[in-house]
Amino acid sequence: MEYVIQAPPVPSLAVAGTKARFPVRRIYCVGRNYAEHAREMGHDPTREAPFFFLKPADAIVTDGADFPYPPMSKDVHHEMELVVAIGQGGSNIPVEKALGHVYGYAVGLDMTRRDLQAEAKKMGRPWDTGKAFDASAPCSAIVPAAKIGHPGKGAIWLKVNGETRQSSDLSQLVWNIPEMIAYLSTLFTLAPGDLIFSGTPAGVAAVKRGDVLEGGVDGVGTIKLKVV
């Protein structure tokens, strides 16, 4: 196909144990999906319907590359998350069939310009400037579900400069993986290449240039990067 300008490269993630890569189509993020994080953000953690926001696919930071501190913010926070990689698309997916649509799992960081997000909330505006900025989605290699199964429990953690900041368990998700896939598929038609950042536990906090972030999910993998 001929384009009038050069087509952008396809964002992608490494797949553990292979030279092939996983092309990224869309990045969906689930908000306030751990009760303790909802409380620390000043919200009631009751089981209300899940809500989602998006990041652009090219916000991915891959293969342990540095995270560049973004402009127009003085309060950038880390949010450690399990990432679900969709391998089979669909809409109105039943909960009991949702895991059949998963290719694999990774660990990622939903980096957030908290000051810009707070300002947007106060003014009733979208969160894009706080959530969807360049390099806002560092992510590890994907591990196929065929190798590790579908994690429903296991530690999720993050350390900054060797000090634990976030520590919880996947069993504490308000909406589990099949439920979030099923609900999301009623709002959007999911497709191969979609990623779902499944929410962050309590302990989110600011980072500064020079910080080293290291986190992981038991049975899935780890991620390590430096803020520059």
Image: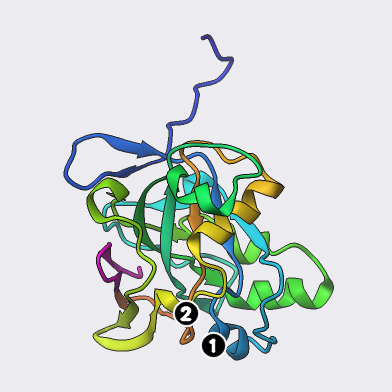
162 vs 31: above or below: below
What is the number of the mark on residue 65? none
Mark 2 and mark 1 lie on one chain; the one further toward the N terminus is 1
Residue type, numbered disc 2: Gln
Residue type, numbered disc 1: Glu
Residue 155 position, x and y percent, is 32, 78
Residue 217 within the magenta-colored segment of the rendering = yes
State the SS at label 1: helix
Circles 2 and 1 in contact, beta carbons < 8 Å: yes
| Magenta stretch, residue numbers | 215-228
In which quarter of the view is residue 215 placed? bottom left
Residue 205 position, x and y percent, is 47, 84
User: According to the image, label 1 marks what residue?
Assistant: 36
User: How far separated are the C-alphas under marks 2 and 1?
Assistant: 9 Å
Mark 2 neighbour class, 10 Å CA radius: few under 14, some 14 to 19, many 20 or more:
some
In which quarter of the view is residue 41 placed? bottom right
Q: Nearer the viewer, residue 49 or 7?
A: 49
User: According to the image, label 2 marks what residue?
Assistant: 172
